[in-house]
Amino acid sequence: MQTSFDLVVLGAGSGGLAAAKRAARHGARVAIVEGDRVGGTCVIRGCVPKKLLVYGSRVREQLDEAPAYGVEIAGARFSSAQLLANVRREVDRLNTLHIGLLEKAGVTLVSGWGRFQDANHIAVSATPGAEAHQVLQAGRVLIAVGGRPHRPQIPGAELAWVSDDMFLQEGFPSHVLVVGAGFIACEFACILSGLGVQVTQLVRGDHLLRGFDRELSAVVQEGMEEKGIDLRFCHSPAAISGAPGALEVLSQAGETFSCGGVLLATGRRPFLDGLNLEAAGVALEGHRIPVDAQQATNVPGIDAVGDVTDRICLTPVAVDEGRAYADSVFGQAPRQVSHELVASAVFSQPELATVGLSEEQAVERYGREAVVVHRARFRSMAQALPQRGPRCLLKLVVERSTDRVLGCHMVGEHAAEIIQMAAIAVGMGATKADFDRTMALHPTVSEEFVTMG
């Protein structure tokens, strides 16, 4: 097997795959080293299987609403075990697909865990820290190993799940306690609730989804509580005890919660374990690898993309960083990735999506008097006959002096699909007048964005 490459990529996740295939297209000899399955967090244990679980968790609610449309369904049986098995089967298919795409692109897949021997040599072993079974010589190295869930240091934390574990379960207990307030915590709380699980969610602060527009997060909270999720604010776990299936969580407020399972959705960190970065002289900044606008670390020829840099930890960002890196280094077409305007979504129930500045961010940057906020709050037509479900919120944040739309936000059905298109307009500098003169498509939820007073 060839052991000398123009580029060795550590990690076959979204950013690493994008960089490897693009660099190979530019004529580089490329190897990608991966000790796990190919696809990374998004494909194997993140966005893709999680979204499939979101779809599955909505079916019970849809069946409950069916009589409002004249459909009577009796005797429906729900099997979380079957849903989970089907999701794992789809992940297996995608893993195989990505392996085939690497082969088609001419990228050499090296199975094993890579670590630096020095700045130009990567040792590969069957398990992390084991004796190397081969050494790769690299003209350049791209670190794209992604992140892993962070498990807080509290007694009994090992008894709990992290998000990776959720996709490996055969089923879920009747009561699960979710710890966290971010998008992963809220998404899994809604998934579990939709699958018929009683959910209690412990939130350290006084609101959900820190960093998102506060008004939007309040609407998500309202919808989650309507689903029966028990949200406990200003609560953090102090200790977990018991055995799987019969756990007790002691909060720092002194309250005890009994449950069948605990999910610690308390953030993620770059996965730097075992890389032996010191052998190459790669500098760290806290828990992350800092890079410049060209994705370069402090060591010439060693670069990093994606979640390991801990800037904007989203799949499309990692993909674009990987492609921009390959174009710049191997394609003689240098470009930089802009992190200024990145749309994001929370696949909670109700769904939240946003692009641009939140109301709070706009006020902080421009001042309260310089910002105008337009909003529409209503129950969508999809809920008119069932007469249930959360109301939508659509919101435009506008700079008063220029009429430019600074932020476009939504909570409600298909929010992510709608905001994806709105992101184009916001990115092009659209004004409120541009939105106003766009003819509405009626009857839709999204028409409210172009009919707001």
Image (cartoon, rainbow, N blue to C red):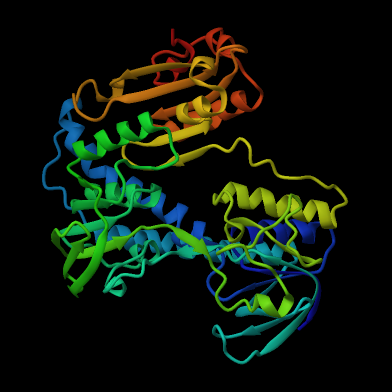
Q: Which of the pair 71/295 is nearer the observer?
A: 295
Q: How many marks?
A: 0
Image position of 179 with respect to 119: above or below: above
Tell me the quarter of the picture where residue 377 sits.
top left
Q: In terms of depth relative to the viewer, which is nearer, 96 or 338?
A: 338
Q: Is residue 122 left or right of residue 363?
A: right
Whether residue 40 sits left or right of residue 353 in the image: it is: right
Whether residue 224 can be seen here: yes
Instruction: Decide which of 436, 239 is in the foreground and name it.
Output: 239
In the rendered view, would you say 343 is above or below 188? above
Residue at image x 56%, y 67%?
38
Q: Residue at x 50, y 40 (%)?
A: 344
Which quadrant does the N terminus fall into? bottom right
User: Is 409 left or right of 412, judged from the image as shown?
Assistant: right
Nearer to me, 206 or 40: 206
Q: Residue furthest right?
A: 332
Q: Residue furthest bottom?
A: 131
Q: Is residue 310 above or below residue 366?
A: below
Which quadrant of the structure image shows residue 130? bottom right
Q: Position of residue 152 (x, y in %)?
A: 36, 66
x and y percentages locating residue 128 in the rendered image: 55, 83
